[in-house]
Amino acid sequence: MNKKPNILWVMTDQQRLDSMGCTGGQVFTPNIDKLASQGSLFTQMFAQSPVCVPSRVNFITGRYPHSHKVRQNNVMVGPDEPHLFRVLRQAGYYLGAIGKNHMFDEADIEKLDFENCSINKNEFDSDRIDEYNQHLDAIKKRMAEVGSWAGACWHDFPEKITRTGRTSQAAVDFLENYDEDRPFMLWASFEDPHAPHTAPQRFRSLYPEDSMQLPDGAVCHTDHPELVGKPSRQQIKRHAQKMTQATESDLQRYMAVYRGMITFVDEQIGKIIDTLKSRDMLENTVIIFVSDHGDFLCDHGMVKKDLLMYDCQLNIPCCIRWPGLADQGKRINAMCEQIDIYPTLLDCLGLEIPPGVQGQSFKQVLTGEVDSFRTEIHAEICFPNNRNAYKSYDEFISEWKQVNEGNIVGHPLHNTASFNVPGDFVKCIRTQTTKYVWYAQGEEELYDLQNDPGEKINLADDLEYVQIKADMKNRLLEWNALSEDPLNAQDVREITENYPWQKRGEASLVSAEPSYQHQPASIV
């Protein structure tokens, strides 16, 4: 049997769809663009969560957050999930993870064959890297004290010691030293362009700050007009980010540095691909490029990200280069969910999709057999008991100061950043024409995407849209019911037996061919 292809899964953190040249963005990304020209570019790939950890777990499990139960950034993937790494380990793959983790706890990291994650304490040391880390800490402090936009800056540190430089070098080292008989799966996870925002000084001339075009209304020193009539947390978040104090030049700098970070990552992706080429592995390696979620980049009067369901956060970059499977330069406009990538990968590899996976394979879309795929996409965030109890920024910040100045241990706001507003339990459904967002505390959003693609006008209380809102709400309810976690206790036991997840070096004692013996449900 022929050796299965290698898999290189490259991920950035907090990159918008429109921050690539191939999607029409004013960002210099020649290596990502080339990847898209040699593979398939997805224009409507949607994340099921707007923040890091839930999104990453969505990718590796092919399951919705309410099924895998990772709904916030403080929870890692559970021990019983039939995730991508377990399945590929069982299929004989050599597993590696490089860069930002943010999905596995330390016990799971030890089960990889090769790892060099940012959580490690054994990074090479030098006076300059100490200075660099102090630089990052200073940015974080400035973001907390001055504003979420305020840390963006250029730097002159050696690029090899930056988090992007170290991730790139670790990936190159992995490939240069790889000498296994089995195929590899390498997860190369770049932390940029996530905060703290800082980019090499040499990119400043590529992105002159005074040439950055800000969205309409980006500079606003009061409540943002667009957010009137929208859920209360949005104005609260905007004030918590101190966006009312930002000048035009402040926000232009944020945008320029953000773009510089992406171009720096693009360069490093090129180095990784060049290494594949030099080792004659490029044509036997599937390359997947994605980001976990986007960035407001001043849209809706905010920066960074939040627990909100706008397209600028959910519509993520995605390119797949699979030699011999699909035509080169294919632009796929079909709506897909990020949970679909995992089952598609297994389907194309000829591997059994384990029970519990809720994503659907879009192999036929890749091969050009069909053009359409999903008619709706879904997203959610936070746990069912999460509520933002604050109705105004003054109410929120007053209690935040009281809790942290008084060191009230156990309070939800204790030891939190002043720009982190407590989350709401939120669910969302989106079609090609309409988006509906439901908040557990009673607020709603409804957008006519045909006439308002920027999602600026909330129609949830518009009497002309009563029936459309009711229809979307019913569709959301139906999805929520039909997508309950399908795994039962017997499934979990079989997953543990068929997809063992041992520490590195431990031999599997089970057959390489998973076999499920599902019992019929009892009739009562």
Image: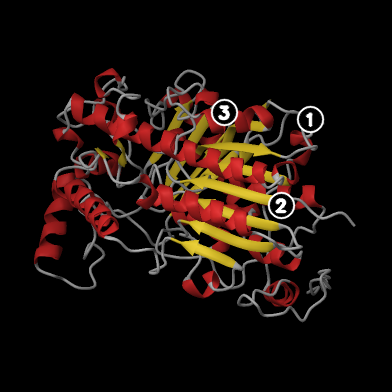
Of 1 and 180, the residue lying toward us: 180
Residue at the location (77% across, 81% down)?
Answer: 509
Q: Which disc, if any, is residue 258? A: none
Q: Please state which of the two labelled residues, at mark 3 or mark 1, is closer to the viewer.
A: 3
Q: Would you say residue 249 is visible in this rendering?
A: yes
Helix, strand, or loop for circle 3? helix
> Dividing the picture into quarters, in which one does residue 328 lie?
top right
Residue carrying label 1: 368
Q: Is residue 191 left or right of residue 184?
A: left
Q: Amino acid at mark 1?
A: Gly
Q: Answer above or below: position of 14 versus 351.
A: above
Asked which quadrant contains residue 353, the reply is: bottom right
How crowded pointer 2 is (Cα within 10 Å; few <14, some 14-19, many 20+) is rated as many
Q: Callout 3: few (<14), some (14-19), or many (20+) C-alpha neighbours within 10 Å? A: some
Amino acid found under the numbered disc labelled 3? Asp
Measure the C-alpha gap from mark 3 to mark 1.
Answer: 21 Å
Seen in the picture, residue 40 relative to 343 is either above or below; the reply is: above
Distance of label 2 from label 3 (alpha carbons): 21 Å
Residue under label 2, please give it.
Answer: 6
Question: Nearest the camera: 2 or 280?
Answer: 280
For the C terminus, the image quarter is bottom right
In the rendering, at what x and y percent does residue 160 appear?
A: 39, 49
Please identify, in this view, whether the residue under mark 1 or under mark 2 is nearer the observer.
2
* Residue 477 screen position, x and y as percent: 57, 48
Say what amino acid the circle numbered 2 marks. Asn
Is label 1 in a helix, a strand or a loop?
Answer: loop
238 and 466: which one is in front?
A: 238
Secondary structure type for disc 2:
strand
Give whichever of discs 3 and 1 has the lower sequence position. 3
Query: N-terminal of the two: label 2 or label 3?
Result: 2
In primary-sequence order, the first of circles 1 and 2 is 2
Q: Which residue is mark 3?
A: 33
